[in-house]
Amino acid sequence: MARRLCCAWIFLLLLLLPGPAAGGKLLVVPMVGSHWLSMQEVVEKLSQRGHEVVVLMPEVSWHMKASQAYEVLTYPVTQTLEELDGAFNDFVAAHLRGLPFPQNILDIYKSYVHVFNTFFGQCKDLFRSQETLKALNQSGFDALLTDPFFMCGATLANYLSLPFVFFMRGFGCDLHFKAPQCPSPPSYVPRVFTFNSDRMTFFQRVENALVSLLEHKYCDGFYSEALKLSSEVLQRDVSFIDLVHSASIWLMRFDFVFEYVRPVMPNMVFIGGINCAKKKPLPKAYAEPTKPDK
Ligand SMILES: *[C@@H]1O[C@H](CO)[C@@H](O)[C@H](O)[C@H]1NC(C)=O
């Protein structure tokens, strides 16, 4: 605990202290996907404040680009852009097929696992690239910033023994509350898919308690590939919680007031507004008020 708090303070200082004299060296491990659009803003600001930032990018990705604000280190990957597109299109299609219950749940779950494993393939490629790993280990980073959804950044931070900070929307199965050990009494904290509120009747509490017994189970299948690789790389059996629980700070890209009320830990910081950092006027079709039907 003391070590975790100490790491948290080091990272806060890294963020807050101005000027090159105070600069630290940060390794950024984004994942493929739209979150990079918000992360890039943070990375550019850190660099403006005199920190040395290195962004680790797969050779194939959707919209990660080089910039003058940060150094880029790319690593070779085996997937093509078409394969990434294909997995993502399947994932979207599964949500739109409109199958009846419970086929819809199974179909969506399968597409989740497929898209996860496809994107996670890039992480396997990273750990195959001895040259990249060696360069990273020799660079003497102070900390690692990552969106941990695909688990690659968290595995790399453990591998390089670096303190790490999460910049994230959340894990499945509410694991982003379980991993930092937020209190989560089933009598007060409603579980996903129960549609209960924080004020439950006796029977709703019973239902909530039953769902809470099952809720982490369906994530085992989801993360099994990732945990297999992490265990290989770190040469010990790791669980999901082992990998992520020691994050120094959890920067959460959502707004506390839009979620269910619940206790959170002091190292969880809500930064939902950051998704609006890149402003663009609405396209004309949406910007004009629609005329009410007569
Ligand atoms: C990183 O380099 C140090 C010093 O050369 C070495 O002791 C350590 O085992 C290396 N770590 C990894 C993960 O390769």
Image (cartoon, rainbow, N blue to C red):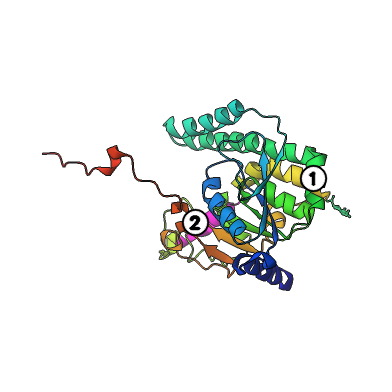
Farthest-out residue, left: 294
Q: Residue at x 33, y 39 (%)?
A: 283
Q: Is mark 1 within 8 Å of ligand 1?
A: yes
Q: Position of residue 272 (x, y in %)?
A: 47, 57
Segment colored magenta: 205-216
Helix, strand or loop for disc 1: helix
283 left or right of 134? left
> Dot 1 corresponds to which residue?
133
Q: Amino acid at mark 1?
A: Leu
Q: Quadrant of residue 100?
A: top left
Name the amino acid, label 2. Arg
Can residue 207 be seen here? Answer: no
Q: Total of numbered circles in the picture?
A: 2
The residue where tag 2 is placed is 191
Q: Is residue 190 magenta?
A: no
In x, y percent, where is residue 222? 63, 42
Residues packed near mark 2 inside 10 Å, few (<14), some (14 to 19) or many (20 plus):
many
Q: Main secondary structure of the magenta part?
A: helix
In the image, taking residue 60 as reference, residue 76 lies left or right, namely right
Horizontal and vertical percent position of residue 129: 79, 38
**Mark 1 crowdedness (10 Å alpha carbons): few <14, some 14-19, many ≥20:** some
Quadrant containing the C terminus in the rendered view:
top left
- The front one of 197 and 144 is 144
